[in-house]
Amino acid sequence: MYVKKIYLKNYRNIENLELELKNGVNIFYGKNAQGKTNLLESIYIGATGRSHRTHKDKELINFNKNEAHIRLEVQKDAIFDKIDIHLKTDSKKGIAINNIHIKKLGELFGYLNVVIFSPEDLNLIKQGPQERRKFIDMELCQINSIYYYNLSQYYKVLKQRNSLLKKIATNQSLKDTLFVWDNQLIDFGSKIISIREDFIKKINKISKKIHSDITENKEDLEIKYKPSVLIEEFKEKLEKNIDKDILYKTTSYGPHKDDMLFFINNINARDFGSQGQQRTASLSTKLAEIQLIEEERAVLPVLLLDDVLSELDKDRQKFLIKNIKKLQVIITCTGVEDVLKNLDEECNIFNVSDGKVT
């Protein structure tokens, strides 16, 4: 699987771009704030329908325009797909696959699988639970369409339940209707917990081997799922905490509070690991993400490396480059020479300046 061609119009600082990419390594270099990350972001949006940098589609549109267009041509063996994303300031974005409009975002997942790796991802372990849940969700949405449905339904129910909790604070008679949302929350939430548990087991097995290879068998990485609540206790936890939830006007337990833990040689890496250990564990996890997509979807994802090589030491750079040779890789950097010294294959090199690519 690879992105054969990318077309952008009025996208952030890129007014008009049509570009063919290599099924191999593509390097975009230039000074900061010129549009390199915008290119990677547009590919990520083509795969997931969402930006990894903002929740507001308006921010993706050129300041002087009312709409923007992203088109990706994707090749997968003998199959050719065209993905179109239309962004508008005054309405929801439109998505079309092979010129057919889709109504649900979940229909987009699977046409293009991507793994994005940025300097922020190196801090996956020491960031808050929300970032780790985001990692789990975006990975699972790409490989499991049922998961995306359950997740979207869960958050709709959660929103309704929290809204009801606020109303109960001023109208206690509504308390008797809370069970309606509780039952749905338990239904969708239990399915999410089950799928996440299986996912963590798989990602742990793969990343453990990778981490051992990086550290030359000196460190053992263990990734564990930390659910907010066990499936068999979900109903009881909701019932016991009704008064607390009404007081704080929010739901105390459920997958929206989940986390994942990282242990290196049986020590909690977030609390006691060095920055180097945390970064190595993050690298292991991102590389495991690539392998899991290959195993689950029988395709190699496109790897987006957003100025991350400069954040790794020489040994980690070499290990990363060595383990991504089978993929289409799109790299952004400020100094192209630093990237080229680790590559032993031909690649496309583009300069990005003020939203223009040459």
Image (cartoon, rainbow, N blue to C red):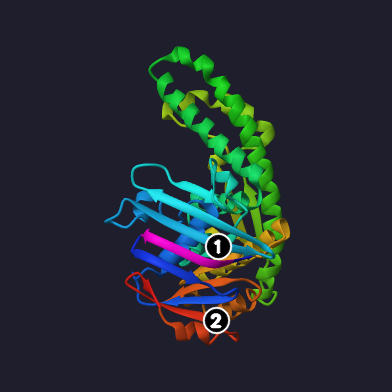
Image quarter hosting the N terminus: bottom right
Q: Which residues are magenta?
A: 3-11
- Depth check: give the residue in front, 308 or 334: 334
Q: Nearer the viewer, residue 275 or 84?
A: 84
Q: Is residue 116 magenta?
A: no
- Rendered residue at 69%/32% (across/down): 232
Q: Which mark is residue 347?
A: 2
- Residue at image position (34%, 71%) is 34
Which residue appears farthest toward the top when viewing the image? 173
- Give the answer, above or below, for where 218 lies relative to 208: below
Label of residue 310 in the image: none
| Residue 328 visible, this angle | yes
Viewer-side residue, 146 vs 292: 146
x then y, percent, for residue 64: 26, 56
Q: What separation in Å lies between label 2 and label 1 (alpha carbons)?
A: 19 Å
Q: At label 2, which amino acid type do we have?
A: Cys
Determine the residue positioned at 44% across, 27% down: 163
Task: Quickly name the residue at label 1.
Answer: 73
Q: Position of residue 205 (x, y in %)?
A: 72, 60
Residue 8 among magenta residues: yes
Point out the tag, 2 or 1, that comes first from the N-terminus: 1
The type of residue carrying mark 1 is Glu
Of helix, strand and loop, which one carries label 1? strand
Q: Residue 28's x, y, as percent?
A: 45, 75
Q: Residue 239 lies in what quarter of the image?
A: top right
